[in-house]
Every structure is written in structure tokens, then in C-alpha cells.
Amino acid sequence: MNSGSPIDRRKLLQGTLGLAAGAALARSANAQLANRAPYGAPSLAPVRLELLAAPGTAQIQTGVTTNVWRYTGTQLSGSHRALLPIPGSHLGPAIRLFQGERAIVRVTNQLGEDHVVHWHGLDVPEDMDGHPMNQFAHGASYTYDFTVLNRAGTYWYHSHTDMRTGIQAYRGLAGPLIVSDAQEQALPLPRGAFDLPLVLQDASFDAAGQLSYSPLTMQDGFLGTTQLVNGKAGYVLPVATRVYRFRVLNGATARVYKLAWSDGTPMVVIGNDGGLLAAPVTKPYVTLAPGERAELWADFRSHPVGSQFTLRSLPFSGVSNGQGAQLDLMQVHVTQAQPETLQLPTSLSTITPYLPQQALNWNTPRTFAITRPMALPFVLNGAAFQMTGVAANEIVRRDTLERVRITNTAGPMIVAHPIHFHGRQFQVYSRSVSSTYLTGWQSLNQGFIDQGWKDTVLVMPGETIDLLVRYTGYTGLFLYHCHNLFHEDMGMMRNLRVDP
Ligand SMILES: [Cu+2]
């Protein structure tokens, strides 16, 4: 069954913007056989986990009980603790794995609708990647079995259900996935209680305190009125006069954040989507689009006990009409004096830049345009999502390096789109923006973290971005899509077919 026709998605659009959401379509069988042998060698005993996806309740707002969907994790085996629940949060527990480790995660669906889990940023086989063709029904389980090939970094896992990714992730079906490796372990970075995930989301509530998901417009998608950190409104983080490693993950369905400290302290960035940067980067603010991650070195040594400040999103323009107001995200309260000896390392990791001439197609970049057909949702590469459909220019060779160009330059209703590629991490080679859209671009561009490894990149209006992408070593269908989850659910998603 093919879910890609504009008719289906137009119906869903009407349904979602109105009262009822469309039902997920039945999954289709995939004729494509994946190459499932890992190309890294597992070095540790497998980590076996159970994740139950089911309805539950949470105190997102203090004193108010809200119905959510949540992952509840259980560790069955493994040589280390692999589940670190976020205290008090309805979000999924942080899953901690090591490079080279095999993870076997059995997910059971008790949601009352189809579900599938994507391991965002990880390089895993086709049938482990959370493609909606592998979604499974209420009452069923699916066992994900993969070897962690990725380097240390802040990845995440979340719903990727056909036309239901937005609502499922919004209601809580998302969590951090932390990978460590030997190089990272050897660095003097904050650990334990000083190494914290900060998952940013926004939400809206009805009069009864229940989550509402009502996308504003096609351009905006869903923008909530309440800012959440780790599943809490009005989040307050007590800290000591120490250094913290904040793993900030934009888990919002559509909102872009321009992150800054209220006291004007610059942001010290040590990592992004694909792990630690080669060296720390200091920025006036950090631009973080849905799906992206930024690791911050937050040094509170010079802040006296009793001081308070705010992590906020500064004003910006150009993303979409509904976005860009200043927002307070969380309060930091310095509550304890403690000694600290850590110094910011001058070097963090080894990142070898791809050379342009290494790309097979340097002179003819593989180009995917963002467009919006008249009165229809946004699309990538000229067509809405088809479950197993690929266009002629969406067939690539495994493990080859290519120059991939994304353009966001067509049409009268241009907005920003965070574009995510499944499979391997890529490098951002260049950005250019047309003068018409320069003002909005300049309100965010100093916060782009284009160094290092990326799996999601914000493509601003009027912008053309060139990436250097070495495709996954696995074969099969791997998605690329907009991480504005409303856009994705409306069909702004395509397959790349990775051939041997
Ligand atoms: Cu989009």
C-alpha cells in the first residue's frame, strides 16, 4: 500500500488541523533485502533492553496531571548500566551505549495505534532504522538489534510512525541516546551528575491541562505556548559552582531555538549532532533546529551561590511567521559551592574533513530541492513521500562520498526546514543565501555549528547548502526528510535507496 498520494496527505492535513488526526496506514512489505551484517566488530557483551511504549501520566506542569505516551525501559542484561531515566520526566530514559557494542532492544507497542522507533543519528541496518514500512501494530513487539558504529555523541530515539511522528514524539515518545568511546572517555570532561541531557520541547495545554497538538499553519507546523525542558514546564536546574556538560537536544516538533545565557556569557560548544568537535567553539548564541543537538561546556565557577540566570531563546526572524519571539527556557540556580579542577580541553576529538575532490560527483552535486506545490504541503525532490518509492536521482551506492546540495530557493512561501538524513553523519561544506533573505539568515547564522559531524541541518529561506555525505555501508531504503515533524507527516520525506 502506498501512502504517498497528495490526496491522502491532504485529508490528513485537514484532519490534523481540525479535530481528528488521520489513522496510520497499514504498513507495507518491503521487497528490498537489506545487508544486515554489521561492519564493525562488537567488543562487549550485548546490552538487552525492553522498551514499553504505552499511555501514562506525567506532571509536566506542577500540580497538573497530564496524559502522555511514554517509553518505560527495563535492562535485561549487559556489562554496564544502560538506562538512565530522566528524573521526573515522561520522556524516554537516556540509553547509554558504547561504540562497538551490540544493542538488542525489544519494543512493545501498547499505544492503540502503529508505532516504530528511529535511532536518530545512528548508522544501523535498514530494518533497524525505524522506517515506517517496518512499523508495528498495537499489541505487537519489534526487536531492534544493531551494533553501535557511531563515535561518542548525543544521539536520540523517537517515533517515526507514518503520518504520526509529530503527535507521538510530542506526547513523549522520545529520549536521549548517549554513545561513549575510548577517546571521549580519556578526556577530562564532566561526568555523572555533571553530564546532563537537556531536551527542549514546546507544548500547548487545554483547559483541563491536557496536551493539545494543533499545527498553526502549513508553514509553521506546531508551535507550543509553553516551553519544556526534560518534560517540565518552568524547569529549574540547581547547580554547584562546577563545570557541566549539557547535552542539549531540540526535541520540539517545529521550533528553532537561538540559545543564549541571560547574563551574556558566551556559549561554549564542545559537540553537536555527531559528537565532540575537534576543538571547543565559542559563540554568542547557538542556533538549534528540531532534531539537532549541541553539547555545551557550562562553567558556573565564577557564579556566586545564590545567583540565578536563565537559558533563553533570543529573538530572530526568517524561520516562519510564528517563530522568533524571545522565550525563557529554564532557570539555573547556583545553590552549592564545590571545588572544581576541570579545565576546558583545547582539543576534543579527531575529525578529518572530507576533501571536495574525494566526492565522486564533485562537479555535479546530487541536488534535492525544497518546494511547495500550489496549495499542497512542502515536498523534497519534487514529490511527497512514497513508502518504498524512489526517484531516479535517489539511488546511491553504499559507502561512497558525494556532494549533496539542498536548495530552499523556490516559491513565494519559503520557510526554514531542518533536513535530516538517516544513515551516516555528514559534513557541511558550504552555505549560500540569496540577498532577499539575508536579514533572517543573519539573525541566526552566527549560531550554526557547522563544524564536525551533522545529521540534521537547518536550511534557511533562500539558502543553498552543500553537504559532503558518505552514505551508509548498509544497503536498503534510508530516509531523508524535514524534521519539522508536521512537514514530515505531511509528506516532506523521501527514500534514498542505497545499493551495493
Ligand atoms: Cu519542513
Image: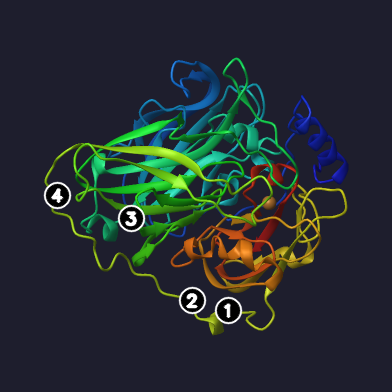
Q: Which residue is found at the position 23% from the left and 59% from the top?
A: 187
The residue that mark 1 highlights is 359
Q: Amino acid at mark 4?
A: Glu
The span from disc 1 to disc 2 (Cα, nearest Å) is 8 Å
Q: Amino acid at mark 2?
A: Tyr
The span from disc 3 to disc 2 (Cα, nearest Å) is 33 Å
The residue that mark 4 highlights is 340
Q: Amino acid at mark 1?
A: Ala
60 left or right of 225 in image? left
16 left or right of 122 in image? right
Q: Position of residue 16 (x, y in %)?
A: 75, 32
First in residue order: circle 3 vs circle 2: 3
Q: Is mark 3 within 8 Å of ligand 1?
A: no
Q: Nearer the viewer, residue 215 or 383?
A: 215
Q: Residues within 10 Å of mark 1 (few under 14, many from 20)?
A: some
Q: Position of residue 416 (x, y in %)?
A: 66, 56
The span from disc 4 to disc 3 (Cα, nearest Å) is 19 Å
Nearest-to-viewer mark from 4 and 2: 4
The residue that mark 2 highlights is 354
Residue 194 sits in quarter: top left
Q: Secondary structure at mark 1?
A: loop
Mark carried by residue 265 = 3
Q: Check whether the beta carbons of the residues at disc 1 and disc 2 lie within 8 A of each other.
A: yes
Q: Which residue is found at the position 73% from the left and 41% from the top?
A: 29
389 left or right of 202 in image? right
